[in-house]
Amino acid sequence: MGRRASIDDGELLDRLGLAFRDVGYEGATLTMLSERAGLQKASLYHRFPGGKEQMAREVLEAAEAWLVEHVLGPLAAPGPPRKRIEYMVAGIDTFYLGGKRACLLNMLSTVREEDGPFTGKIAQMFEAWIAALSAVLVDAGVPKKDVRPRAERAIALLEGSLVLSRGTGTTRPFRDFLKSLPSELLGASG
Amino acid sequence: MGRRASIDDGELLDRLGLAFRDVGYEGATLTMLSERAGLQKASLYHRFPGGKEQMAREVLEAAEAWLVEHVLGPLAAPGPPRKRIEYMVAGIDTFYLGGKRACLLNMLSTVREEDGPFTGKIAQMFEAWIAALSAVLVDAGVPKKDVRPRAERAIALLEGSLVLSRGTGTTRPFRDFLKSLPSELLGASG
DNA sequence: GTCTATAGGAAGATAGAC
DNA sequence: GTCTATCTTCCTATAGAC
């Protein structure tokens, strides 16, 4: 066994994730990642032999695990649809720091090549989220043909409100979106 | 007078703009910009002594001019609100190539520093767009308190549908958004 | 496991001929 | 105005001590 790590894997991936979400994949330099992680570059390479790409991949996988546990899981749990959605809303608020942090899926879509190393996983995560929302809407008795469009619209509003919050320098678009999300999903009467 | 340019300024800014929208500011290398422009690096520097940052700034200014002419102008023109909105929809469809191209405002928000060189202009363009939409909604008789939120929501949906289209590898979210936009703005009865 | 130091290469930017 | 060739800086990645 080697020496104890000065920072545990979860905290490390958190910090790297915040960095990628601030400046994107290409914008994140090893020097910056090293500073935000509190580790020297060589130490990062010790933990991520695959370099920056591996860091981003593991960050994305950690985000996926988070999504499953705090969003997809609760959405699929038993209970009234409204409660499940409210639970998701709380999770989203935490994850995006009230609108102060961008979405990793958006920031990692900017990678150079046509089909970057994250394209597949990103599409998969969007699909899983939309599917989980759709299931709740079905349970809530939303008409079949409205289900998928409404779920997609909710995700688009989430992404867009984050873009707009970032672009205008205020978190209000995101906060307004979160407040309206339950009725957005369940219907204006909600 | 020097020699004739092998490509006019408008076309040049178009090509650079498409490049930035594909891979973002940090992701766009001078080599790539040179290839997509059809000019050598030194030629780009001749036209943009300020380098990559100046290129992006001028691209952003060109986008602003486009926005004013094809979106804000028509929105402010006389005529029935629905017609003005339909005109804007056509403009948006063209500009984003039916959902195949990302939004410059989103892609340039990823710049390194807290307050990057484009932050101010980006906020300004978002604000101008929201204001122009708000004016139309007022003309359409939308209740005062609903106007601004609804305009903001439309812009968020635009941005988000582009993110989702890019992330899932299909233009359907964007196309669905465009189709629903008029009634989104004018009310479900629209 | 973390560090300092450095290699190797790509990126932004410039010089000077045509 | 555009080009080829080059410079310099920054970035990714590695070597090797502790």
Image: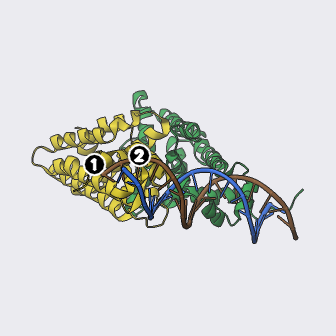
Chain colours: A yellow, B green, C brown, D blue
Residue drawn at point x = 43 percent, y = 44 percent:
A35
Residue drawn at point x = 34 percent, y = 35 percent:
A98
Kindly identify the amino acid type of the residue bearing the numbered disc 1.
Ala
Kindly identify the amino acid type of the residue bearing the numbered disc 2.
Ala
Quarter of the N terminus of chain A within the rendering: bottom left
| Residue tagged 2 | A19
- Kind of element beneath mark 1: loop
Q: Quadrant of residue B152?
A: top left
Crowd around label 1: few <14 · some 14–19 · many ≥20 (10 Å): few
Crowd around label 2: few <14 · some 14–19 · many ≥20 (10 Å): many
Residue A65 or residue B179, whichever sits in front: A65
In the visual, does B43 lie left or right of B151? right
| Residue tagged 1 | A5
Contact? badges 1 and 2 (CB < 8 Å): no
Q: Position of residue B35 (x, y in %)?
A: 64, 66
Estimate the spatial distance between the alpha carbons at disc 1 and disc 2, rounded to whole Å: 20 Å
| Residue furthest top in the image | B144
Q: How many marks?
A: 2
- Kind of element beneath mark 2: helix
Q: Position of residue A101 (x, y in %)?
A: 38, 41
In the visual, does B113 lie left or right of B7? left
Residue drawn at point x = 24 percent, y = 53 percent:
A65
